[in-house]
Image (cartoon, coloured by chain):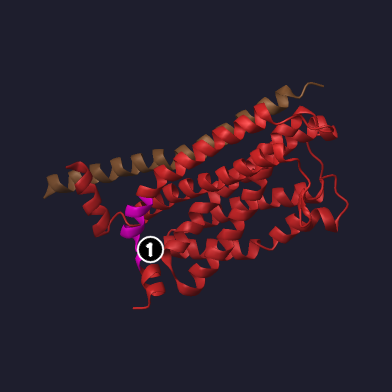
Chain colours: A red, B brown
Amino acid sequence: MNPIFLFFHKTGSPPWFYKYSGKLIPWLWAVFLALTVYGLYLGLVVAPADYQQGESVRIMYLHVPSAWMSMMIYGLMAIMGFIALVWRIRIMEVLVISSAPVGAAFTIIALITGSLWGRPTWGTYWVWDARLTSELVLLFLYFGVIALYNAFDEPRKAARAASLMSIVGAINLPIIYFSVEWWNTLHQGSSMGSDGPGIHPSMLLPLLLMATATKFFYGANLLSRARLTLLKQDHRKRWVQDLLSKESH
Amino acid sequence: MSHTPFIVGAYLISAVVLFWAAIAPVVNKRSLLRQLKNRQTRMDKLQ
């Protein structure tokens, strides 16, 4: 068999995925914790206050990585949803539906931290600005994917519907990204432009560390959720029965 | 205006949301495994 097909065949097998993802999860959590502790130390203790935003710039070390993750996770869901629908790879369906709560959590954090940053900086918690509104729409899309999945009794049919909704909803991603260019918004433009980041290294480093940490959080949480979904879907299958009898002995 | 309550609030809320997201699959898995084991024990007794 072609090595690429063999790889997909192996990783797509639920018992194989369950076994090896279980070994990977503690390492992902460990890297997440190490990066978060160091990133928070640099962001909260070492980095200076901003000359315009003052101390509230420290909220950015949470807000920006969360906002990036909210978009990245939805983008990945759309890609995995496409693969799931075209090649009928079941593990991709499981990954789509397991990603949605993690993406929703990051979107909630992005919205709340943005609001808490906005009050001292803009003088208001919320404005119906294009960036803020499109990010709120993203949260509703995550809720929509979760609700749609739970609306079906048959898990594979449910996952395919959720995959389709992930693909359709991806239209919101360029709207979020370009909203600050297409409309007059209160939200500032990107600080990580093509001509290099407009941020001092003392602030850029904690920001990038926190952004990397959130990727590891997503990895660990996604795998935990995917393992749970597999157990729920396959609880009558032989590999889960074997796993249970091994654990009880 | 002091920025401290906003910073502390942002970090606390984020910690709660992330903690919930991290712990939910662990708690649900334990509960599912307990249910499956109880079911298997009942089946074994019936046989």
A168 or A155: nearer the viewer: A168
Q: Amino acid at mark 1?
A: Thr
Residue A77 seen in the figure: yes
Q: Which residue is mark 1?
A: A11
- Disc 1 chain ID: A
State the residue at coordinates (64%, 32%). Answer: A42
Q: Is residue B9 visible?
A: no
- Secondary structure, mark 1, is helix
Compared with residue A239, is residue A63 higher up or lower down, i.e. above or below? above
Spot occupied by residue A8 in the image (x, y as percentages of width and height): 40, 68
Q: Residue at x 69, y 58 (%)?
A: A173
Q: Quadrant of the N terminus of chain A?
A: bottom left
Q: Which image quadrant for residue A233? A: bottom left
A21 magenta-colored: yes
Q: Nearer the viewer, residue A41 or A236?
A: A41
Disc 1 crowd rating (10 Å Cα; few below 14, some 14-19, many 20+) is: some
Left or right of residue A113, residue A87 in this image: left
Q: Magenta residues, as a range? A: A10-22
Q: How far across and down, in percent of the image, does residue A17 sit?
A: 36, 57
Q: Position of residue A148 (x, y in %)?
A: 54, 57
Q: Residue at x 22, y 44 (%)?
A: A247
Residue furthest left as drawn: B47
Left or right placement of residue A48 versus residue B29 in this view: right
